[in-house]
Image (cartoon, rainbow, N blue to C red):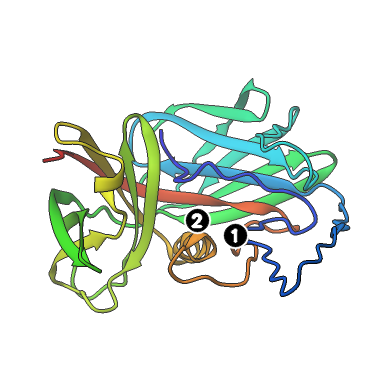
């Protein structure tokens, strides 16, 4: 199962921090700047998903770490993880490796509200998510756009948006065995339409003809969409915003997100 679209870790202090410190010096003098970055108490980070495929579902539990430490997955061992559903489902997870908790194989059901409960280090954290109805990804196509005399190539997802209901989508782009990009979208302007939605990640900078691009198309609930949209804003190169933690759907000050989602995937040959 590929749930999370980005390999993201969290550091204490400014927990989710992306930024550049630039200094403009208008003289020949140079001065050393010593940044005093205070560390704070580690915070738990929980990333988990339940989809509509009959497979092992995964929850990743870690803690934040010092700003000065090397980027890493700071896995948290010994947690108790339980999933319950409004349909009466109860699933107990087991720790596969440090911080990685797996369920037995099972398939989530659209329309069901799932609650994930994590007990760790004497604290309890919960999040709920309702699995939307499935929307099928019909096709992938490629679009070429020219900006500043440079032609870039993008992948586009084609699907039929159901009329009369709000839908939130999360598209994950993979190639060469890695997740490269994602996009959180909705149907505010496309309700009930056949949608041809461009994912604005320049494939031509990393791919060559003959490579395969894959897109996982997830239907998510509103809170999960808000999380991934906010995460994308934080990491955007074209629309910089003040860095902040994306809004988690967990309580008790935990970071991360729990998503119950349907998924549909397609592959296409890059030309």
Residue 249 marker:
1
Q: Which residue is pictured at 74% across the width and 45% down the height?
A: 64
Can residue 55 be seen here? The reply is yes
Pointer 2 local density, CA inside 10 Å: few below 14, some 14–19, many at least 20: many
- SS at mark 1? loop
Residues marked 1 and 2 touching at CB (< 8 Å): yes
Pointer 1 local density, CA inside 10 Å: few below 14, some 14–19, many at least 20: many
Residue at the spot of label 2: 129
Q: Is residue 9 above or below residue 228?
A: above
Q: On the picture, is 39 further left or further right than 220?
A: right
Q: Position of residue 255 (x, y in %)?
A: 67, 53
Task: Compare residues 50 and 61 and report the one nearer the observer.
Answer: 61
Q: Position of residue 193 (x, y in %)?
A: 13, 71
Quarter of the image for the N terminus: give it.
Answer: top left
Q: Position of residue 74 (x, y in %)?
A: 71, 34
Q: On the picture, is 177 further left or further right than 104?
A: left
């Amino acid at each position: 199962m590929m749930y999370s679209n980005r390999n993201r870790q969290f550091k204490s202090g400014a927990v989710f921090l992306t930024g550049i410190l630039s200094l403009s010096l208008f003289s020949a003098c140079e001065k050393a700047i010593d940044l005093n970055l205070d560390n704070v108490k580690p915070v738990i980070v929980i990333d988990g998903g339940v989809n509509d495929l009959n497979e092992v579902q995964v929850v990743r539990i870690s803690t934040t770490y010092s700003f000065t430490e090397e980027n890493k997955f700071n896995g948290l061992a010994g947690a108790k993880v339980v999933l319950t559903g409004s349909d009466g489902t109860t699933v107990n997870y087991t720790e596969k490796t440090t911080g990685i908790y797996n369920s037995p194989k099972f398939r989530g059901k659209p329309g069901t509200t799932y609650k994930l409960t994590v007990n760790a280090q004497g604290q309890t954290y919960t999040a709920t998510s309702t699995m939307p109805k499935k929307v099928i990804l019909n096709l992938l196509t490629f679009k070429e756009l020219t900006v500043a005399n440079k032609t870039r190539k993008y992948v586009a997802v084609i699907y039929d948006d159901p009329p009369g209901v709000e839908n939130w989508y999360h598209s994950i782009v993979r190639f060469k065995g890695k997740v490269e990009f994602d996009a959180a979208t909705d149907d505010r302007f496309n309700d009930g339409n056949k949608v041809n939605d461009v994912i604005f990640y320049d494939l031509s900078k990393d791919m060559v003809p003959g490579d395969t691009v894959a897109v996982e198309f997830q239907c998510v609930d509103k809170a999960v969409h808000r999380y991934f949209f906010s995460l994308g804003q934080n990491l955007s190169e074209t629309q910089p915003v003040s860095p902040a933690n994306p809004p988690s759907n967990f309580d008790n000050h935990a970071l991360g997100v729990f998503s119950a989602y349907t998924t549909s995937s397609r592959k296409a040959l890059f030309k």
